[in-house]
C-alpha cells in the first residue's frame, strides 16, 4: 500500500487520547493496517501506533523476527491489536533501553512491567488474549502508551540515561 509520514515528538497529535475502533472488517481499516505495516517495516520499527501516523484510533501493530534497531531482542510475533487493555501480572518493573520512531535519534532507559496480560481484538473483531514477558511485554506497553498520548521520554526516571543513539550505542542503526 503506502508508507506514511511518522509524526515526531512536539506534534500535539501525539499527545491525544485515542478513540476506540468501532467498525471492524472494513476496507478502510484493512488499508490503514497495511499502511501501518509498510511504514513500520520501512523504518525498521518494532511496532507502530495509529496516532504516530496521525490517526487517532486505538490500534497498534508490532512484531518482528529480527530488527536492526534491536539486534539482541528476541522474536516478537507480528500482531494487530485494537482497543487494547493491559494488566500487569506482577508488580516487578525492569529498566530497559527504548527508542521510538516519533523520537528519532534518541534512546532512554524506561521502567516497564516485566510480565503482562494484554487483550483486545484484531481487525475482524476476533479476541486476542496473551500473557507475555520480557521484550514482548516492553514493546506492547510502549506502543499502547501512544494510545494514551504518552511518549517514552515522559516515563524516564533518570535523564542521565537518555541520549543520542549514535553516542550511546556507536555503530547501531541510527534510524530511531
Image (spheres, helix red, strand yellow):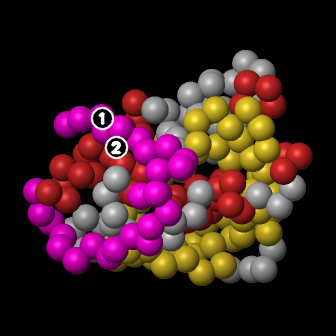
- Find residue 72 and report its image quarter: top right
Q: Position of residue 137 (x, y in %)?
A: 62, 62
Q: For the C terminus, which image quadrant?
A: top right
Query: Is residue 88 or residue 49 the one in the foreground?
Result: 49
Q: Residue at x 18, y 70 (%)?
A: 24
Please indicate whether residue 145 sits to the left or right of residue 163 in the image: left
Give the residues in magenta: 1-27
In the rendered view, would you say 107 is above or below 168? below
In the rendered view, would you say 55 is above or below 6? below
The disc, 1 or 2, on the residue closer to the chain's N-terminal end is: 1
User: Would residue 170 be visible to someone looking at this image?
Assistant: yes
CA gap between label 1 and label 2 equals: 8 Å
Q: Position of residue 132 (x, y in %)?
A: 61, 66
Q: Residue at x 68, y 80 (%)?
A: 89
Say which element carries label 2.
helix
- Find residue 114 and report its image quarter: bottom right
- From the image, tell me which residue sits under label 1: 3
Please give the label number shown on residue 99. none
Main SS of residues in magenta = loop
Q: For the N terminus, which image quadrant?
A: top left
Query: Is residue 25 or residue 110 the one in the foreground?
Result: 110
Q: Position of residue 145 (x, y in %)?
A: 55, 65
Q: Residue at x 79, y 44 (%)?
A: 162
- From the image, tell me which residue sits under label 2: 37
Amino acid at each position: 500500500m503506502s508508507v506514511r509520514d511518522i509524526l515526531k515528538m512536539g506534534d500535539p497529535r501525539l499527545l491525544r487520547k485515542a478513540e476506540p475502533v468501532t467498525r471492524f472488517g472494513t476496507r478502510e481499516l484493512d488499508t490503514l493496517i497495511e499502511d501501518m505495516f509498510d511504514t513500520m517495516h520501512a523504518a525498521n520499527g518494532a511496532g507502530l501506533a495509529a496516532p504516530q501516523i496521525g490517526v487517532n484510533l486505538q490500534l497498534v501493530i508490532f512484531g518482528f523476527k529480527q530488527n536492526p534497531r534491536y539486534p539482541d531482542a528476541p522474536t516478537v510475533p507480528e500482531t494487530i491489536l485494537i482497543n487494547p487493555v493491559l494488566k500487569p501480572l506482577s508488580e516487578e518493573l525492569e529498566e530497559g533501553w527504548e527508542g521510538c520512531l516519533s523520537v528519532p535519534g534518541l534512546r532512554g532507559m524506561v521502567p516497564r512491567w516485566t510480565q503482562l496480560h494484554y487483550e483486545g481484538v484484531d481487525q475482524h473483531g476476533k479476541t486476542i488474549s496473551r500473557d507475555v514477558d520480557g521484550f514482548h511485554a516492553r514493546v506492547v506497553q510502549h506502543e499502547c502508551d501512544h494510545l494514551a498520548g504518552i511518549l517514552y521520554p515522559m516515563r524516564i526516571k533518570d535523564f542521565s540515561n537518555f541520549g543520542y543513539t549514535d553516542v550511546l550505542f556507536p555503530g547501531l542503526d541510527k534510524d530511531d
